[in-house]
């Protein structure tokens, strides 16, 4: 084990001892108070100085949890960045020692996404970043059938996932940019003219086969539809657009959906309504030209009614977003949960919201974190077979304190409960 010190305490215990433990870089666990639904938290490893970010969590067939993230001195400009992982087994008081998951020699490896496939095989999707440019990112994957023991999975296959969005990508981008232009502010002032130039450039570059085949990046979990179709959500910083990699043969082959277009969006998270409609919730990256105090930064939403083949123009929701990753999850009882930074400007506050009407409204919200000066972001969320919700996210309680990946497990009803201590 990694030598973490675990401490269980009631949720209404004074938070000062918890902050003290976190400042020391030690793991911590919190059990729910009497009468409050289950809640527990711990650090996967002690606070440390390296950049650790973009975690992804999955439940393995044996009930254990596997988490992956990237680790190194930076991101796209740092070739020492690798994918790391750790395990948590039921009954354990701490996560396992950290182990390697993927490393492309001389290139940064970022944004891991874990997925247990229809044949119970483990998939790891991630990106390697050539030339220090997100726009040139190479989408990679590896699979393992033996991954339930200690240490890293025993990988048995690795390849690159290459997509050709086709000319449809360019034509649909042009159509949706045309729909979007009237909604953008300041089109008659210098900022607006500059924004028009950006859109025109992107439309032109969308006809470049080489560019549209590169730079598709991972972030959020895959979605499996009732038909067996698998959707891998992807985004491009080069095009400020998203799409789905679609597989109808259990991952043997992949093709591109139509693009998701909106006001500078990325990192889609997909959930399915009972009527078959797919909703993609996305981070708003925000054009620099639109960055002023009058603009409301919101999570963006697009819909598909054909199993992910095509997507509506993305529109803002009422949910704030400070240019940060979000993830949505449909629980087995029909309720939905969204984990996001509920602020327009900062990532110091991280919340869970719950909907009982498939995302039409979000009636309940409760904070996982809220501390000025902290950074709590890039969440990953799943529901395990016992009904509990698990969230992992980047955890940096303050400047100079170090970073870790935090793991929170809870009864979904905790979101609706009242607890002044959180």
Image (spheres, rainbow, N blue to C red):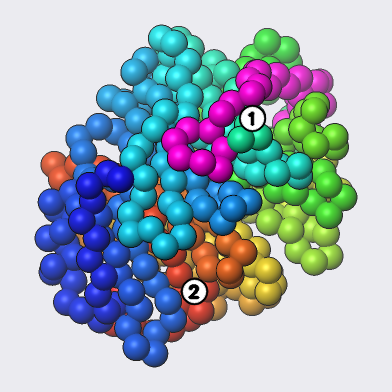
140 shown above or below 35: above
200 shown above or below 54: above
Image position, residue 76 (x, y; %): 40, 21
Q: Are marks 1 and 2 in contact (CB under 8 Å)?
A: no
Residue at 37% from the left image edge and 15% from the top image edge: 79
Q: Quadrant of the C terminus?
A: bottom left
Q: Residues within 10 Å of mark 1 (few under 14, many from 20)?
A: many
Residue at 80% from the left image edge and 37% from the top image edge: 250
- Left or right side of 279 for 135: left
Q: Quadrant of the N terminus?
A: top left
Q: Which mark is residue 411?
A: 2
- Left or right side of 300 for 133: left
Q: Secondary structure at mark 2?
A: loop
Q: Is residue 195 magenta?
A: no
Q: Which mark is residue 329?
A: none
35 shown above or below 194: below
Residue 310 visible, this orientation = no
Q: Secondary structure at mark 1?
A: strand
Residue at 82% from the left image edge and 43% from the top image edge: 229
Q: Residues within 10 Å of mark 2 (few under 14, many from 20)?
A: some
The range drawn in magenta is: 147-173
Residue beneath label 1, please? 143
- Left or right side of 247 for 335: left
Image position, residue 232 (x, y; %): 68, 38
Q: Quadrant of residue 290?
A: top left
Residue 353 visible, this orientation = yes
Q: Is residue 161 magenta?
A: yes
The residue nearer to you, when weighing 99 against 362, is 99
Q: Quadrant of residue 169?
A: top right
**How far apart are the alpha carbons under marks 1 and 2?**
31 Å
Going by the picture, which residue comes out furthest to the front? 149
Image position, residue 14 (x, y; %): 17, 77
């Amino acid at each position: 084990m990694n030598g973490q010190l675990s401490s269980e305490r009631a949720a209404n215990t004074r938070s000062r001892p918890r902050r003290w433990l976190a400042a020391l870089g030690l793991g911590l666990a919190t059990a729910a108070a009497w009468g409050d639904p289950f809640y527990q938290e711990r650090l996967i490893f002690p606070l440390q100085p390296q950049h650790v970010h973009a975690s992804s969590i999955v439940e393995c067939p044996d009930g254990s949890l596997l988490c992956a993230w990237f680790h190194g001195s930076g991101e796209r400009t740092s070739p020492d960045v690798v994918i790391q992982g750790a395990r948590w087994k039921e009954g354990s008081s701490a996560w396992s020692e950290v182990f390697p998951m993927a490393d492309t020699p001389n290139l940064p490896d970022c944004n891991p996404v874990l997925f247990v496939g229809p044949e119970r095989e483990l998939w790891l999707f991630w990106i390697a970043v050539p030339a220090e440019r997100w726009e040139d990112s190479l989408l990679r994957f590896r699979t393992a059938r033996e991954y339930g023991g200690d240490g890293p999975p025993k990988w048995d296959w690795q390849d690159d996932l290459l997509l050709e969005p086709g000319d449809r990508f360019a034509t649909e981008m042009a159509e949706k940019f045309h729909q979007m232009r009237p909604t953008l502010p300041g089109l008659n002032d210098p900022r607006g003219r500059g924004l028009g130039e950006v859109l025109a450039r992107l439309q032109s570059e969308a006809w470049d086969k080489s560019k549209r085949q590169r730079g598709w990046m991972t972030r959020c979990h895959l979605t499996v539809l009732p038909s067996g179709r698998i959707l891998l959500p992807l985004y491009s910083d080069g095009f400020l657009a998203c799409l789905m990699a679609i597989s109808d043969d259990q991952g043997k082959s992949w093709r591109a959906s139509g693009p998701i277009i909106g006001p500078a969006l990325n990192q889609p998270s997909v959930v399915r309504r009972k009527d078959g409609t797919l909703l993609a919730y996305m981070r708003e990256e925000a054009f620099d030209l639109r960055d002023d105090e009058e603009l409301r930064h919101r999570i963006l939403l697009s819909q598909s009614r054909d199993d992910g083949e095509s997507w509506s123009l993305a529109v803002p929701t009422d949910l704030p977003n400070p240019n940060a990753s979000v993830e949505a999850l449909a629980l087995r009882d029909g309720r939905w949960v969204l984990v996001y930074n509920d602020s327009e400007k900062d990532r110091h506050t991280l919340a869970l919201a719950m909907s009982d009407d498939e995302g039409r409204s979000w009636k309940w919200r409760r904070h996982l974190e809220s501390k000025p000066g902290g950074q709590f972001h890039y969440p990953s969320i799943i529901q395990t077979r016992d009904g509990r919700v698990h969230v992992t996210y980047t955890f940096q309680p303050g400047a100079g304190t170090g970073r870790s990946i935090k793991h929170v497990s809870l009864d979904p009803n905790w979101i609706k409960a009242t607890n002044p201590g959180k």
